[in-house]
Amino acid sequence: CAEFQPKSAKKLIEYARQEFELGSGSNSVRAKLEQVEKLTGNRPEELDNLVEFPSDMAYQWRYFVELHGKRSSNGFGINPISYQDMYAYFKLIKHTPEEWEIDLLNQLDNVFLEVHNKQQESQQKKK
């Protein structure tokens, strides 16, 4: 039923927001915080209070990561993950998702797009 959503789903959304905001790679917020720790010997608070990955949501996170990796763009920016993309993906992996899983994927995508758009706006202001 659509109302059912594991308690861990909320934690996964918090984890995702954190990961999207911290980023990865040598120029990410995470890398800069780790560099501060290395140089000063003081661990930044942002690295101490990280949301732990809810391991019971590993499949749902994998679904999102795989769909996210195949996301399309329109020349002006990235597109949200479409229901068509989800349908094709789940058909390929032979999985019939529960309604809450589709809802969770949409929530994760919305969080990603929100963080991405904020980062884009911030970069535009720097120019």
Image (cartoon, rainbow, N blue to C red):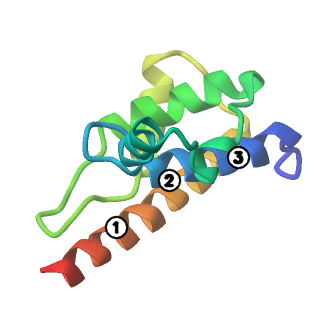
List x then y, in percent, for residue 69.
32, 35
Mark 2 lies on residue: 109
Q: Position of residue 36 (x, y in %)?
A: 42, 46
Q: CA distance from mark 1 to mark 2?
A: 15 Å
Q: Amino acid at mark 1?
A: Gln
Q: Secondary structure at mark 1?
A: helix
Residue 18 placed where, x, y %?
57, 50
Q: Earlier in the sequence, mark 3 or mark 2?
A: 3
Residue 57 position by quadrant: top right
The residue at the point 73 percent across, 35 percent down is: 98
Q: Nearer the viewer, mark 3 or mark 2?
A: 3
The extreme top residue here reads: 94
Identify the image quadrant of the N terminus: top right
* Outermost residue, bottom side: 125
- Split into 4 quadrants, where in the image is the C terminus? bottom left
Name the residue at 28% across, 70% down.
Answer: 120
* Mark 3 nearby-residue class (10 Å; few <14, some 14–19, many ≥20): few
- Residue 119 circle label: 1
Q: Is residue 112 left or right of residue 55?
A: left
Q: Earlier in the sequence, mark 1 or mark 2?
A: 2
Rounded to the nearest angstrom, the CA distance separating label 3 from label 2 is 23 Å
Q: Secondary structure at mark 2?
A: helix
In the image, residue 60 above or below residue 5: above
Q: Is residue 96 visible?
A: no
Nearer to us in this view, 127 or 96: 127
Q: How many marks?
A: 3
Task: Using the image as rendered, state which of residue 127 and residue 116 is in the foreground.
Answer: 127
Would you say the residues marked 1 and 2 are in contact, meaning their CB atoms lie under 8 Å apart?
A: no
Q: Which residue is mark 3?
A: 49
Instruction: Give the side of residue 50 with respect to residue 68, left or right.
Output: right
